[in-house]
Image: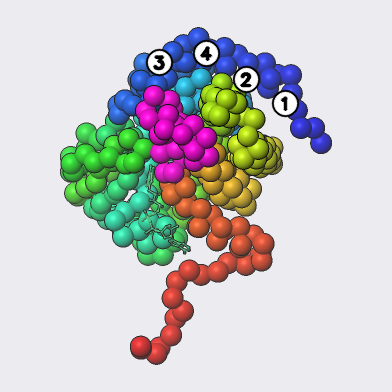
């Protein structure tokens, strides 16, 4: 066992750091407060070979590994946390499911532009009545000629207002086995979005109404029975969310560390107070432990897809650690930490969302319990003929 990066991994990380420090660091604060997707950054990253890092070269990717993509998020976050969203969108999100399961034609129509930084894809899983219980989704695919008519409502999709296409979870039939997915371009007739609202992290969200939208056979991604595959691909998205949580927590920790070494009260630097030192010791222990959980999930991944158990443990832990570090960093920086003069409050808001998005901490702990006891625990009410 070796706890160091290989020479190639270190060189790659250093190269990404060099690029991010040169091109992204200067505008980091302003970028964090801009609602629109940073297309300029996306194009720069594409030119730099930071999109589709772990995708096959035949698909327009870089032929690297999941670990490389993780290192890229870490290195970019150190310079510009907001730009890490672009690495997520071009490597870990629904784009990964498209790259894994899409047909050559689907990849040509949608993946090419995403990897050039000219387009993004969003994923529509969540519905008003199907959040954690995502398999309760009711968006229906009804056969119509060679294709399907889609009817339903989706909420909370990241990039909903910018995405060219939505990877949409739909129900072809009853039960978990009836779930699959289709690709719906935003230009499709019957694709409508409601008023734009805001998440606490500053991102936009909307309700998306699918009103008898026709999807031809060429836009079916996974037919019924595809749910398990989708969730396997979704573990990569979860790892991206996990890495950003930890990296944003570390970013806040570093800002607070600099502050504690330069800010004086009572005639002493903050870092000389034991009460402050112990906060840093706690943060450091948690950041190091979270790092190892992420690297374990990546090292154990099969074909670039980490296991459900490794992913759940890493995500539940790092979501909490990222948030805890931002929270403590804000406290250590006093009033200044609570302003928009630094990125600590931005990291705080982002980390808070990842505790809910992509499988909440509670749902992940349910998954962890299942792996401990090697059995499933239905979350549904017991079936009984009694009425209460
Ligand atoms: C920043 C952000 C980005 C998102 N991006 C997307 C996206 O791109 N695409 C998309 O489809 N969705 C997205 N979502 C939606 C997200 O997936 C859901 O919010 C999430 O699955 C929780 O569903 P819910 O909000 O309906 O909460 P609910 O499911 O109603 O849960 C409410 C609370 O109850 C807890 N809970 C529920 N069931 C259990 C249980 N069995 N055991 C213990 N606790 C339980 C939850 O953990 C949570 O704390 C995003 C959400 C956020 C916040």
Residue drawn at point x = 65 percent, y = 37 percent: 274
Marks 2 & 1, CB-CB < 8 Å contact: yes
Question: Element under label 3?
Answer: loop
Q: Which residues are magenta?
A: 327-353
The residues bearing labels 2 and 4 have C-alpha atoms spaced at a distance of 12 Å
Question: Element under label 2?
Answer: helix
Question: Element under label 1?
Answer: loop
Say if residue 52 shows up in the picture. no
Quickly name the residue at label 3: 27
In this view, 62 is above or below 104: above
Q: Quadrant of residue 68?
A: top right
Precedes in sequence: disc 3 or disc 4: 4
Residue drawn at point x = 55 percent, y = 69 percent: 377
Marks 3 & 2, CB-CB < 8 Å contact: no
Position of residue 319 measured from the top left corner of the image (x, y, whole percent): 53, 44
Quickly name the residue at label 4: 21
Precedes in sequence: disc 2 or disc 1: 1
Q: Depth-wise, is mark 4 or mark 1 nearer the camera?
A: 4
Precedes in sequence: disc 2 or disc 4: 2
Say if residue 275 shows up in the picture. yes
The residues bearing labels 3 and 1 have C-alpha atoms spaced at a distance of 29 Å
Front position in the image: 89 or 55: 89
Quickly name the residue at label 2: 13
**The disc label shown at residue 5, or none:** 1
The residues bearing labels 3 and 4 have C-alpha atoms spaced at a distance of 10 Å
């Amino acid at each position: 066992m070796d706890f160091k990066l290989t020479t190639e991994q270190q060189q790659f990380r250093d190269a990404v750091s060099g690029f991010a420090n040169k091109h992204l660091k200067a505008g980091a604060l302003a970028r964090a407060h801009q609602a629109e997707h940073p297309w300029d950054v996306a194009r720069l990253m594409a030119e730099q070979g930071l999109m589709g890092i772990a995708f096959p070269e035949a698909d327009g990717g870089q032929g690297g590994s999941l670990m490389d993509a993780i290192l890229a998020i870490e290195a970019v976050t150190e310079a510009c946390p907001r730009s890490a969203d672009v690495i997520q969108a071009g490597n870990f999100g629904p784009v990964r499911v498209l790259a894994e399961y899409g047909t050559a034609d689907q990849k040509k129509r949608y993946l090419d532009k995403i990897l050039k930084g000219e387009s993004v894809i969003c994923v529509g899983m969540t519905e008003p009545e199907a959040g954690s219980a995502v398999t309760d989704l009711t968006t229906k695919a009804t056969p119509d000629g060679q294709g399907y008519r889609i009817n339903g409502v989706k909420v909370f999709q990241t990039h909903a207002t910018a995405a060219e296409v939505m990877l949409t979870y739909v129900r072809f039939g009853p039960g978990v086995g009836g779930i699959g997915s289709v690709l719906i371009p935003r230009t499709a007739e019957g694709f409508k979005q409601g008023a734009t609202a805001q998440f606490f992290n500053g991102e936009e969200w909307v309700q998306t109404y699918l009103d008898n939208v026709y999807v031809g056979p060429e836009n079916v991604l996974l037919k019924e029975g595809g749910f398990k595959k989708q969730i396997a691909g979704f573990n990569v998205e979860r790892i991206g969310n996990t890495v950003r949580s930890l990296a944003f927590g570390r970013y806040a920790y570093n800002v607070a560390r600099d502050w504690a070494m330069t800010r004086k009260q009572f005639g002493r630097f903050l870092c000389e107070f034991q009460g402050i030192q112990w906060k840093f010791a706690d943060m450091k222990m948690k950041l190091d432990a979270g790092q190892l959980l992420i690297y374990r999930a990546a090292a154990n991944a099969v074909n670039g897809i980490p296991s459900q158990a490794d992913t759940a443990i890493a995500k539940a832990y790092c979501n909490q650690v990222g948030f805890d570090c931002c929270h403590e960093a804000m406290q250590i920086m006093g009033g200044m930490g609570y302003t928009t003069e630094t990125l600590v409050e931005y990291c705080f808001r982002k980390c808070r969302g990842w505790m809910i998005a992509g499988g909440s901490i509670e749902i992940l702990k349910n998954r962890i319990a299942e792996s401990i006891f090697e059995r499933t625990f239905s979350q549904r009410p017991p079936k009984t003929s009694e009425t209460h």
